[in-house]
Amino acid sequence: MKTLRRGFSLLEVMIASVVLSLGLLGLVALQTQAKFASYEARQRTIASWLANDMVERVRINRDSWSAVGTVTVNLAANLPRPTCAAVDGTMSACSAAELRNADLHYWQQALLGASVSGAASSLTSPIGCVVRQANNALMVGIFWAGRQNISDGGGASSAATLINECQLSTTNNLTRRQFILATTL
């Protein structure tokens, strides 16, 4: 009499384990990409906040920013706090030049991550650029280094103008990230 055997053969078990292993490897790769995308999104959000912060500073102190020109703020620039500005952020009897210097000082501190608890910088090697053009046009750019190379479309006219104005060398730098905010005051 012939008996029917029920169960899995060794070959079926091996095939199932290979399929399961490939699925788990896919999930690990997906988690890695999600973590990287989350980091990039956080950096872009910080850059957006910093650019908007500077636009609002210029709008509030419009008279001190009336001159057309370019200002670049980076790690190397040591922008001291003006004497009319207190440590707690209050200001009294500041001239237009001192208000502008205070705006740049506090913006540099934000770029460097001074307000972030436990972190040296919220962006890696940040550079900020403010370009006040004729007709009340204002462009604020934040440039920083990303973790890995990317390839973007690049070449937008406002970005090229800002890069030229700030004299930043960003050609062939695939780790460079940028956020540019153009507005009219």
Image (cartoon, rainbow, N blue to C red):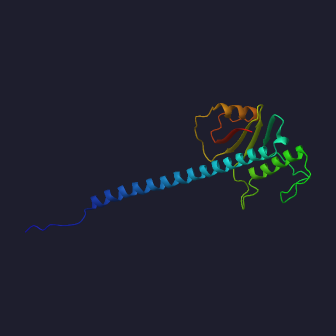
Percent from the top left, x then y, of residue 120?
A: 74, 56
Of residues 43 and 140, which is closer to you in this image? 140
**Placement of 135 over or under 78, stated as above or below:** above
Percent from the top left, x then y, of residue 86?
A: 88, 57
**Left or right for 9, reference 137:** left
**Left or right for 100, reference 130:** right
Quadrant containing the N terminus in the rendered view: bottom left
Q: Image point 82% across, 40% down: which residue?
A: 65
Of residues 30 and 25, which is closer to you in this image? 30
Q: How many marks?
A: 0
Of residues 24 and 46, which is closer to you in this image? 46
**Left or right for 14, reference 54:** left
Percent from the top left, x then y, of residue 123?
A: 69, 50
Q: Image point 70% across, 43% down: which residue?
A: 142
Of residues 127 and 21, which is closer to you in this image? 127
Q: Quadrant of residue 91?
A: bottom right
Percent from the top left, x then y, of residue 112?
A: 75, 52
Q: Image point 75% across, 40% down: which residue?
A: 129
**Placement of 53 over or under 88, stated as above or below:** above
**Left or right for 166, reference 47:** right
Quadrant containing the C terminus in the rendered view: top right
Q: Image point 68% across, 40% down: which residue?
A: 181
